[in-house]
Amino acid sequence: MNKSHEEEIKRFWEARSIYEKLKESSKGRGASGSSRKKFYFLDGPPYATGSIHMGTAWNKILKDTYIRFWRMSGFDVWDQPGYDTHGLPIENKVEKDFQIKSKSDIEKLGIEKFVHECRKFATKYIDIMNQQFANLGVWMDWKNPYLTLDNEYIEGAWHTFKIAFEKGLLYQGLYPVHVCPHCETAVAYNEIEYTKVSDPSVYVKFPTKDGFLLIWTTTPWTLPSNTGIMAKPSADYVKVKVGKETLIMAKVLMDDVMKRAGVTSYKIIGTMKGKKLDGLEYEHPLIDIFKFQEPVKHRVVLSEQYVELESGTGLVHTAPGFGQEDYKVGVENGLSIISPLKLDGTFNETCGQFAGIFAKTADRKIIDILKERNLLLHEEKVTHDYPLCWRCSSPLLEMAVTQWFFKVTQIRKELLKENKKVKWYPEWAGQRFENWLNSLGDWPISRQRYWGIPLPIWTCSCGEVKIIGSSNELPKLTDAQQKDAKGVMQSASYTLKDLHRPYIDDIRLPCKCGKEMSRIHDVLDVWFDSGLASWASLGYPNRKELFENMWPADLNIEGPDQIRGWWNSQLITGVITFNKAPFKNILFHGFTLDAHGSKMSKSKGNIISPEEVIDKYGRDVLRLYLLSSAPWEDFYFKWTDVDAIAKSFMVLENTYNYVKSYAPKAKKVKDLEPEDAWILSRLNNLIEEVTKHYRTYNIHKAVNAITNFMLNDFSRVYIKMVRDRVWPTYSGSDKQSAMFALFEVAKECSKLLAPACPFFAEHVYQIGELGKEESVHMCKWPKPYKKYANPQIEKEMEIVQEIIETANAVRKENNVKIRWPVENVYIESDDETVKGCLITFEKVLKNMTNSKYISHGKSEGYSKAFSKGTVYVSKNVLKAEALMRELLREIQSHRKLQKLIVEDKIVLYLDNDSMQEFEREIRDKVGAKNIIFGPIEKPTGQVQLEDEKVSFKIETLQKIYE
């Protein structure tokens, strides 16, 4: 089945409105008459960037497969897709389009214009991506996606924000956070990426009254903000004489420092414990340049926790304005907190000759000044991990800035408790999430940007602060105010048509002091947006019915980056708002990589788009390929593996075509032949197994179980066993039993395949007329065939298959072709089950071993051992019949070359009278109307076995009549 056939199926679905009918029917009543149980699937919102890639395709295919499964299982599934529409990813795109370099450029352009362009870009590709996902066969409510920019969604955010305030979980404070100097805003801990960089590594001397404290740092730009030096109280420190100077450092690191600095002559003149250094005052080496250092009392403080003795000097430069550890130690010890950088990363006007210089650029200048003052012992380069902005890839700076925070550390116990209630697939992903939760700090929730959910905080010059949780809390505006609000008011409800900046910035609230309160111009972290999805997408709190019927979400399916991303923000906001986790089950999937394990990227030229695979093989080949591996492991894309899946599909399609041709709408029978009973028992097991795997989110095991059953048990074993019994000319009493089993397996497996391979399942369901429903996707999920469960016959069939395989191996070893009949096959075994098999499956064994006689015992023939005994194959080949089998094979091959179908009759000419013995069998097997024996002019072909030959000629009836 190729892409064009899938297009036909798509047109069928669209013309018949199958998705819409399915959605409507799933809202009805169940078998018991009660309302169908709800299943709330929550789609993690991606950015609508314009085109999907293999990773997003895998993600949506996983989601679609489970949506289809649960819907077929009788649930009313909520399948609304969503899109992230705010934040720096959108702003950065617009900045690039307008060649914007800084926030001042945005202000010049105008916030209204900038926000308008952000909205345009955020929504520009939604329809395109909807179509791309739908093209994969993903059935979701593409006409009604939730968007984080909608007013109703924003109100959901404000609702949660106010609850955080009311619970005492919101605070404003000066705290070190990572700042992106390009975006000029704070970046949360879950938005940071790391890369290897080379930075200066310097050993700096800080003067004391009788020597120098030697510190080591890789961030010289933070030295202007130094207000303390940490020492480890339990460590041994030394005073080291180097020339005329005395340096203080940790004893264990002394030799390494001297070696690095190239100092060969030095002497210890004193030792002490680190605690003896507590309170030792020193002079800041750059105090004359950075005047704000003049009133600061610089001194040594103690820290057992934050001073390591593996590298450096054992004395840690401490700048509480630039680093969380420094900040904690600084607060604990009353050190001054100095942060003279602006959000763009440049030193402010208090920094003298450094004013306006970018922090990292200042490194060189600071080092040179220290060198001039003989305060630099040594300089080298060090390679280490450095944080980058998750979107623009700019190097981040950690600095203390005033931000609004959620006090996440206060609710950590609740977060961990709720996570224990969530079922993670696999379990280790839940443990990974727990480890992440244990490391959480407070969440800086505010962003100094433009395109995002506005912070619902109004302040007054008198110090009053007001948090609103709904637009209904905004004041009723007078007519004059409505005109002044840039035409953004709805006088009926007094809510803004657009709650974004700059319109919301115009709203003033009355303060109890009599003045007006203005909104803080910050917006919310974009991760906060998506974290609200489980209720804000349902319209909560303005609309409560959907929320009350469905929340929390039954299932999330996302990748590993959501451990610190979406699941993190969801759990925090869920616990803040409802004291509860917003999800019940989480399926964790890996990354998609190339065949060598590298990330796919344009720069590497190793990107493979979903469309490439679809154009070559079709959608369902892509789907089955992506679903066949454990979802939580990284997926290595290999064309050879795709090709193997495509070949499997060819076998599946041929199998269904076979069933259509030989077992159309077979009637149920009372008595089954042993092999028919076996395949139906295996079908029962398959349904149980696949259902279990789907319900436990082992989707790869489910699809592999189906394909293995179809390719092996059904196609390669069972159909070979019964093909003579369903041949059109066969009229034996056991024919209906085989036809019934063939049809039942084909019918039920089309349903089992439907979630993973919706196009193929629909195709075979329609051409095979496998059910009464309009579409296979309207069928109920198969229930196990309990009445056909037969463990004993399955056990016996395992033995039968081993006997057949052993007999075939014997033939191969002795150059006796399988299609050559032999006189007998004997099986020697003391196992009573084996003896029973020889009776129960006698006809099957004779047919599949191509022997005239099957019996228990020992023979003089070719032999080979199997697990329960020995198989003996007679050396006596029935040559005339063997020649006939070779003839049948060659005639069938020529029928295929002439593109004849089963119903096309031929006239067959044979020149060997020995074949008259098999005339009826030949006529039935090759579809011959007549067989004419005698000399042949221009034969179609010839077969030979040793010294016996048969030539043949094929003519179609149509050609004869012409």
Image: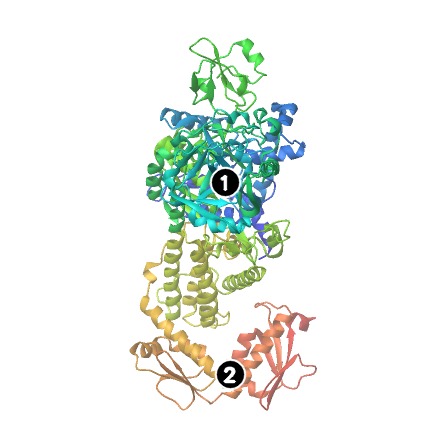
Residue 191 seen: yes
Q: Toward the viewer: 927 or 705? A: 705
Above or below: residue 313 compared with residue 476: below
Q: Earlier in the sequence, mark 2 or mark 1?
A: 1
Indicate the position of residue 536 as horizontal and vertical percent values. 45, 31
Q: At label 2, which amino acid type do we have?
A: Trp
Tell me the quarter of the picture where residue 51 sits.
Answer: top right
Side (left or right) of 689 relative to 595? left
Indicate the position of residue 886 as horizontal and vertical percent values. 56, 81
Above or below: residue 365 compared with residue 684: above
Mark number displayed over residue 198: none
Q: Toward the viewer: 737 or 398? A: 398
Question: Residues at badges 2 and 1 in contact (C-beta under 8 Å)?
Answer: no
Q: Secondary structure at mark 2?
A: loop
Figure colour scheme: rainbow
Q: At label 1, which amino acid type do we have?
A: Glu
Quadrant for the C terminus in the image:
bottom right
**Marks 2 and 1, Cα distance to the nearest angstrom?**
57 Å
Q: Residue at x 43, y 9 (%)?
A: 513
Q: Which residue is mark 2?
A: 820
